[in-house]
Amino acid sequence: MNALLNKLKDQFAGLQEREKRVVAGGALLIMAAIIYLALLPQLDRHGQLVDEQASLYADMLWLQDQGATVSRLANTCPSTNPSALAPSDSLTRLVRRNQLQLDSLRESGLSFMLAFTASDANRIVRLTHQIACAGFIVQALEVSKSSTATNTWDGSMEVQLAN
């Protein structure tokens, strides 16, 4: 190693002053390029982190702005214990409580198919909400204007036990 260094020193000493400046300038440029190439991945990562921080900050501000909306979406179901009634009895009771006429109630496993008639479509919406609060999942809901009577609505609903 020392022999190689001594040989380089001898060759450098044999150069003219102008050539020494060119070699020294080239060595400085090479060192600067090596340092730049060593720091380049870190600079790229820093830029990515700054962009990610800005994105996360924008998301945080958006979430803070949505606080009022989220509070309105709170569950309005009363916190009561599940009924001791059979599921079909519970559904029948809910339909009658909303003053709907139960046309049919079919059970197949954990699923129930309800058919009913209502004088007001809003009662059907309330029934849907109450059924969801009672521990059922509403799979399908169909409401249509009755073809047989005026001012009545025919509805059918498929629900399933949530647990």
Image: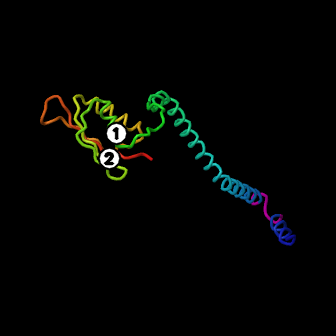
Q: Is residue 13 above or below residue 47?
A: below
Q: Which residue is mark 2?
A: 112
- Rendered image quadrant of residue 23: bottom right
**Residue 136 locus on image (x, y percent):** 39, 42
Q: Is the residue under label 1 in contact with that under label 2 (CB below 8 Å)?
A: yes
Q: Which residue is mark 1?
A: 91
**Residue 125 locus on image (x, y percent):** 31, 32
Q: Quadrant of the N terminus?
A: bottom right
What colouring method underlies this structural image?
A: rainbow
The structure residue drawn at horizontal position 18% and vertical position 31%, both measured from the top left corner, is 152
Q: Is residue 8 above or below residue 122?
A: below
Q: Are there few (<14), some (14-19), or many (20+) residues within 10 Å of tag 1? A: many
- Rendered image quadrant of residue 90: top left
Magenta stretch? 13-19
Does residue 100 appear to the left or right of 35 in the view shown? Answer: left
Residue 26: numbered disc: none
Was residue 83 drawn as part of the magenta stretch in this picture?
Answer: no
As shown in the figure, which amino acid type bears the numbered disc 2?
A: Phe
The structure residue drawn at horizontal position 40% and vertical position 46%, both measured from the top left corner, is 161
Q: Are there few (<14), some (14-19), or many (20+) residues within 10 Å of tag 2? A: many
The structure residue drawn at horizontal position 27% and vertical position 44%, both measured from the top left corner, is 105
- First in sequence: mark 2 or mark 1? 1
